[in-house]
């Protein structure tokens, strides 16, 4: 949902780069997981503010700039069960990563390795060789089936 960008001030506050549509989405959660891959720690959030288009937060146990600096670059997540269910035809990026992508002709493009935000729309990064960048928009993505783990796209193999 974000990452720690830098310390903010001298009292242990952190500046956050958010990955959600709204800058203050993380403010809805009282506890955050901060870390990388298998090294996550839970932090209780004491205060969150939007400060000149940047989210800043005070975490329990982080009382000075050095402690905040030690968190720089770490990712911020929340437990999956704390997230609201997505609306119809909306998906969490984490649900799309790993899905098999097949075009309408039955050509298997491989799996989604990540998603990118381009400003105009999200982009699926699919396969290894060749790697494909497929726009995640309605006229291209025909079906997403989380049960079978597949995404059907109207995208030619030679694009």
Image: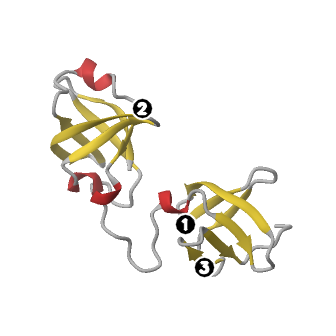
Q: Which residue is mark 3?
A: 143
Kindly check if marks 1 and 2 are in contact, taking CB atoms under 8 A apart as contact: no
Q: Earlier in the sequence, mark 1 or mark 3?
A: 1
Q: Depth check: give the residue in front, 158 or 104.
A: 104
Q: Depth check: give the residue in front, 122 or 151.
A: 151
Q: Which residue is mark 2?
A: 73
Q: Where does the C terminus fall, quadrant-wise?
A: bottom right
Q: List x then y, in percent, for residue 88.
A: 42, 80
Residue in view at x 19 percent, y 23 percent: 10
Based on the displayed image, in which of its 4 quarters is residue 109 positioned?
A: bottom right
Q: Earlier in the sequence, mark 1 or mark 2?
A: 2
Q: Is residue 149 left or right of residue 35?
A: right
Q: Which mark is residue 120?
A: 1
Q: List x then y, in percent, for residue 66.
A: 27, 18
Q: Residue furthest right?
A: 158
Q: List x then y, in percent, for residue 1.
A: 38, 50
Q: CA distance from mark 3 to mark 2?
A: 35 Å
**Label 3 CA crowd tier, 10 Å (few <14, some 14–19, many 20+):** few
Residue in view at x 81 percent, y 71 percent: 107
Mark 3 secondary-structure assignment: strand
Mark 2 secondary-structure assignment: loop
- Residue 50 vs 35, above or below: the answer is below
Based on the displayed image, in which of its 4 quarters is residue 7 positioned?
A: top left
**Label 1 CA crowd tier, 10 Å (few <14, some 14–19, many 20+):** few
Q: List x then y, in percent, for residue 142.
A: 63, 81
Q: Which mark is residue 108?
A: none
């Amino acid at each position: 949902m974000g990452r720690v960008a830098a310390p903010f001030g001298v009292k242990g506050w952190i500046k956050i780069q958010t990955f959600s549509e709204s800058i203050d989405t993380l403010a809805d959660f009282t506890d955050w997981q901060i870390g990388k891959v298998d090294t996550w720690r839970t932090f209780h959030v004491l205060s969150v503010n939007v400060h000149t288009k940047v989210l800043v937060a005070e975490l329990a146990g982080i009382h000075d700039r050095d402690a905040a600096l030690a968190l720089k670059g770490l990712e911020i997540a929340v437990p999956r069960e704390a997230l609201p269910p997505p609306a119809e035809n909306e998906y969490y990026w984490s649900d799309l990563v790993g899905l098999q992508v097949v075009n309408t002709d039955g050509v298997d493009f491989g799996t989604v390795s990540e998603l990118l935000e381009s400003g105009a729309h999200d982009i699926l990064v699919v396969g290894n060789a060749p790697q494909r960048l497929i726009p995640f928009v309605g006229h291209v993505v025909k079906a997403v089936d989380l049960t079978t783990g597949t995404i059907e796209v109207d995208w030619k193999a030679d694009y």
